[in-house]
Amino acid sequence: MSKFFDKIAKIPRLGVGISGEFASATKGIDACWLQENYPTLIHFFEYGGDLDRGLDEHVRRWVNLALPTTYHFLDINIEEKADLTEDWLVSTIEMAKEINAVWLCGDAGRWHFGSRERGHQMLMPPILCMDSVLESVDNIQKIQNQSQLCCLPENPPAVVYLGEMHILEYFAEMAERADCGLLLDCAHLAIFQHSRGLSPLTGFDNYPFERVIELHVAGGTFTETSGYSYINDDHSPEPIQATWEILEHVVSRAPNLKAIVYECEHNKAEECLDNFAKLNQLFPIQRKDLFQLIAK
């Protein structure tokens, strides 16, 4: 029997949230201001962090509101076993628990080349093959066992992907073998499908919708460089049509979905309000869940 499903059944629906990174509120949307002025639109905050920068005053103010947070790591190569050092694991768990994170999540790609330091930070996708899946599984299991929190791997963005597997197959294998949930980034999937010349919903036939716990939505821009067409994951206010199509497809099929994050924090709040409202219509928070969130 899967321990994951027992654990996730005890977590209430978080609803619709906003992402943020270190000092993002100084340049874009302040999650606390948004919640105070539009409390029906935003219910939780996903903080993207790394050990080098740590926590900022933005997420600390949010924690003081006693509303839910999740912690999105930005500095671990999930598919590289040697990168999961004990010091990273201990410090990351401490930081996540300091903000009362409901779970951990992060792009299951490569955040750095060589040693972990700010000058090396980037984001590359995993190699879409079974060897990569198996190494990622070991890391996810270790994170979950030591933190006692769910760790949700996310499909990362890229303009080029290496490996023979479809990215949905890759993450389906990872989730089943690690007994973990999934964070499906709908915008990143739209980018992948475009890069392979596939329709937005290709690859969902054997996908474990029951393991999808969180969805991401963000804007993107069709771009061409030297004749190569791709979608730039620029987090502009308006998601492309393929992203909406993927989101609506998954929402209606994911029985354990707990959260949707709108990654729009670098924009002006007024440019994003309509999409926050749309997301709340697609994924309304239940009164019983709202009471549980307040109680926590």
Image: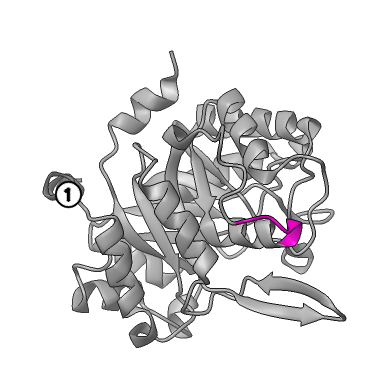
**Residue 42 position in % (x across, y down):** 28, 66
**Residue 256 position in % (x across, y down):** 35, 37
Residue extending furthest toward the top: 1
Confirm whether the magenta stretch covers residue 141: no
Q: Quadrant of residue 59?
A: bottom left
Q: Is residue 104 left or right of residue 229?
A: left
Give 22 or 219, whichever is nearer the viewer: 219
Residue drawn at (20%, 75%), measured in percent from left and top? 36
Magenta segment, principal secondary structure?
Answer: loop
Confirm whether the magenta stretch covers residue 198: yes
Q: Is residue 215 visible?
A: yes
Residue extending furthest toward the right: 226
Task: Using the image, determine if residue 270 lies above or below residue 84.
Answer: below
Residue drawn at (84%, 54%), measured in percent from left and top? 114
**Residue 107 position in % (x across, y down):** 61, 52
Task: Using the image, determine if residue 274 lies above or below residue 135.
Answer: below
Give 296 or 268, whichever is nearer the viewer: 268
Span shown in magenta: 195-199
